[in-house]
Amino acid sequence: NAGVTQTPKFQVLKTGQSMTLQCAQDMNHNSMYWYRQDPGMGLRLIYYSASEGTTDKGEVPNGYNVSRLNKREFSLRLESAAPSQTSVYFCASIGINTGELFFGEGSRLTVL
Amino acid sequence: AQSVTQPDIHITVSEGASLELRCNYSYGATPYLFWYVQSPGQGLQLLLKYFSGDTLVQGIKGFEAEFKRSQSSFNLRKPSVHWSDAAEYFCAVGALNNNNDMRFGAGTRLTVKP
């Protein structure tokens, strides 16, 4: 049981380049999330998807887009990367009726 | 909107000593409270959670936390710290029926001295 898998684990971009972070979960969870983690700021919610076909903005959505491709997959896209988007990104899904978030191992993104 | 404050950015304790990590929250309704742990280079793992009932909850790895409504606190404790407990700890508050509103504190980094 793989849980939550996200790729790539590391990526370096130049300002203005685009990229997509991929996330998949095999726990049949309905809700999925994208967080970013920055030193001293904890985890901040970028976007979430309560169910297949729906997405909503979180606390810091600017500069990002998401796609809930199916129940398993939830991708995060940076259309034009900026240095302020240098961060560690975590995908998560939430257990049905448990409230527990299950996290991927993170994707470290550096924008030069 | 709810918020979480972890007053201590970094704590150092000796191995075998007791530990208490502080967490204060602000939430308009009955909160659902969580503690997560993050080892270096890893994702977050749930230590324990409080939804309702007994205000003292037990978690994995010998951790416990106490919900105090009057103080809006949910402090994490461990009687005797092990070197493997060195990690970053995050308190979070959310609502089971409003899952988008899971807010995290800034984290407390724990160093364990031999």
Image (tube, coloured by chain):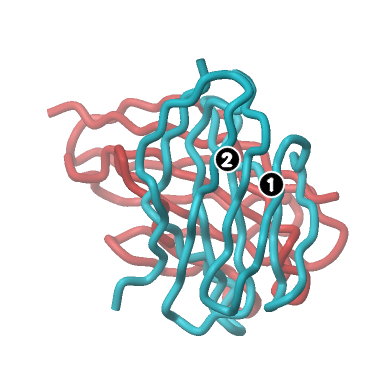
Chain colours: A cyan, B red
Q: Position of residue B113 (x, y in %)?
A: 19, 26
Front residue of B21 and A40: A40
Callout 1 secondary element: strand
* Quadrant of the frame with the C terminus of chain B: top left
Chain assignment, label 1: A
Q: Is residue B8 above or below residue B27?
A: above
Query: In x, y percent, where is residue B88?
Result: 39, 38
Mark 1 in CB contact with mark 2 (< 8 angstroms): yes
Q: A47 or B34, which lies in front?
A: A47
Q: Which residue is mark 1?
A: A46
The mark that comes first in sequence, 1 or 2, is: 2
Q: Is residue B36 left or right of residue B30?
A: left
Side of B70 where A31 appears, left or right: left
Q: Describe residue A96's horizontal placement relative to residue B16 as left or right.
A: right
Mark 2 residue crowding within 10 angstroms, few (<14) / some (14–19) / many (20+):
many
Q: Which residue of the protein is positioned furthest toward the front in this rendering?
A: A17
Q: Residue B46: x percent and y percent?
A: 43, 62
Q: Which mark is residue B34?
A: none
| As drawn, A49 above or below B25 | below
> Given the image, on which type of amino acid does mark 2 rest?
Arg
Q: Position of residue A95 (x, y in %)?
A: 54, 77
- The foreground one among A79 and A23 is A79
Label 2 secondary element: strand
Between the residue at mark 1 and the residue at mark 2, the CA separation in whole angstroms equals: 7 Å
Residue at coordinates 58% horizontally, 69% vertically from top-left?
A: B50
Query: What residue lies at 55% left-to-right and 80% top-to-bottom?
Result: A29
Q: Residues within 10 Å of mark 1 (few under 14, many from 20)?
A: many
Considering depth in this image, is B80 or B51 the residue closer to the camera? Answer: B51
Residue B93's image quarter? bottom right
Which of the 4 image quadrants contains residue A104? Answer: bottom left
Numbered mark located on residue A36 in the image: 2
Residue drawn at x 72%, y 51% is B72
